[in-house]
Amino acid sequence: MSPNGTARLYKLLSGLDEDLFLLKCRILLPDQPGELAALSTMVGQRKGNIVRFYYNRSEHPEMVLLEIVGENEAELRSLIDLFTENDYFAEKLISGIDQDITDPESILKVKVRLENKPGTLGAYSTLLSEHSANVIYMLYDEDKYPHSAEIVLAAPNPMKVRSILKDMNERDYYYKVLYDGKDASQMHEIIGLKLNERFFMRLNHLLEPSDAEEIKTIIRSTEEVSRTLISFSQEAGSDLEKGDIYAQILALASTSIARTGHRFKPLKMKVIESEDLTFIGWKMPTGGNIYLMQTNGKTVLFDCGYGIYFNDFVSLLKSEGFAPEHISDIYLTHADADHAGQSGLFEREFGTRIHAHPDSLHVFNSGDRSWGIQTRHSSLNLHFTRLINQFTEITPPEKEIAAFSTNPIREIGHFKVIDSFELGKYTFDVIESLSGHIRGYVFFFCSDAGILISGDYLLDVSSLSDDEIANLNRPRFLMTSTNLDSTVFKKEMQYLKEWLMEERKNRRTNLTICPGHGKVYHI
């Protein structure tokens, strides 16, 4: 990027005895301790006085808006050349996300008095660099706030914060401490922190240290996650702060990881147990329910939860007397990670065949749950899908899925029956949704047993725990609904209820609704 695009020099109106010049520029300063001191030294050597300095690391980790006043035009022009030599005008590729600031007690926010004369800011920034403190936010504006600057800095440790304050006292700086890390409730007010850093600080209070470190390791070590988070943040812009999307996504990931191993405790739901049929379900700690049907020597699953639970779920099956290797088929309602995450793992480990709508294959391949529908936030949906898939370890099928037919056989209410399959003496209709939630969504209805597997439709909200409701609501912070078309989704819900009421009138026995979240219920 040329310096002409980021620097402007103006002659100011002044008195008869002197001329003043103003240099306004936008520079890219490396995000590390000592850089502000080096910059201030350059300005002082060219007899310039910094009258405005704005930097907010959470907005851009390198961008600084700078205004410098000087009496010598040549000196200021040489300063532009010096900035160019130091690559301050060059766009840099942000190739990762720093996660160094995780201790709130290592942060200091102060308002400090700085006289309006050359060298003042340089002297103060040198003090900070002596303590290896990094400025993450600074507003110094002589027009708006004469003789003072608001600064947020991150020190290597809490002891350094105390040393900085001690040094400021000894050097006769007048200042007011606005935050010194002791009141965690004020963390949301600290400017300059990136969203992931804010989350990590909260994470330390929510999880055991080992669990919190595991989340950090996933993000730090996975280049794909880092790139996706950067894209997600840039795409969302200021809306990301309002919704706190990043923290919501990581909260879901941390909750899921924290409930694996010895903390994996799904809730078992018995649906039907008879001489020729066993139909049971499990509410996973997070994500969608998994249903198992065993009849006539055949064992299948309907949906299969987050991939992160695969090992725990396999152990659970064994403990319940089911051989995982005997699960011949998995029937998927749709391709979201919380319903299809283990599908590829069962396929690879046990040769299980995966059945789904052909559009689900496109969702798997694109890594985008909004595939096929363009909305204002389609890009955000893409990044969101990739983040959730990464954190919950979705493993799509590698082999060609057994795709349902899409040729309508008949109609049920407002829906089309596009296929059917038999499990022993039980026949299941495959009912195609209207794509209100996601493309390639199907319901499974067995009239013989009176079972409807509805997935993310027809949830019994009263049966959901507070954690489940929070987990289900997290994607809604994405400035869009979890549904691709909420209007269509609402219509589908009404159509389903109308059809079920009509179906119930024609039956002697109740219908059993097996939703993707919450408990099974009867109507």
Image (cartoon, helix red, strand yellow):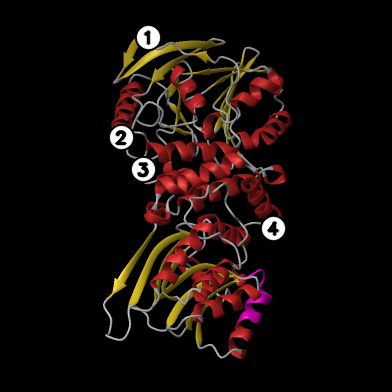
Query: Judging from the image, what secondary structure is the residue with disc 3 in?
Result: loop
The residue wearing badge 4 is 209
Which badge, 3 or 4, is on the more N-terminal residue? 4
Q: Amino acid at mark 1?
A: Asn
The residue wearing badge 3 is 480
**C-alpha distance separating marks 1 and 4:** 53 Å
Prevailing SS of the magenta stretch: helix
Residue 181's spot in the image, x, y percent?
A: 57, 73
Query: Judging from the image, what secondary structure is the residue with disc 4 in?
Result: helix
Q: Amino acid at mark 4?
A: Pro
**C-alpha distance separating marks 3 and 1:** 32 Å
Q: Nearer the viewer, mark 2 or mark 4?
A: 4
Inspect this view and state whether residue 466 appears.
no
Residue 73's spot in the image, x, y percent?
A: 38, 71
Q: Nearer the viewer, mark 1 or mark 4?
A: 4
The residue wearing badge 1 is 407
Which badge, 2 or 4, is on the more N-terminal residue? 4
Horizontal side of 481 relative to 13 (left or right) equals: right
Q: Amino acid at mark 3?
A: Thr
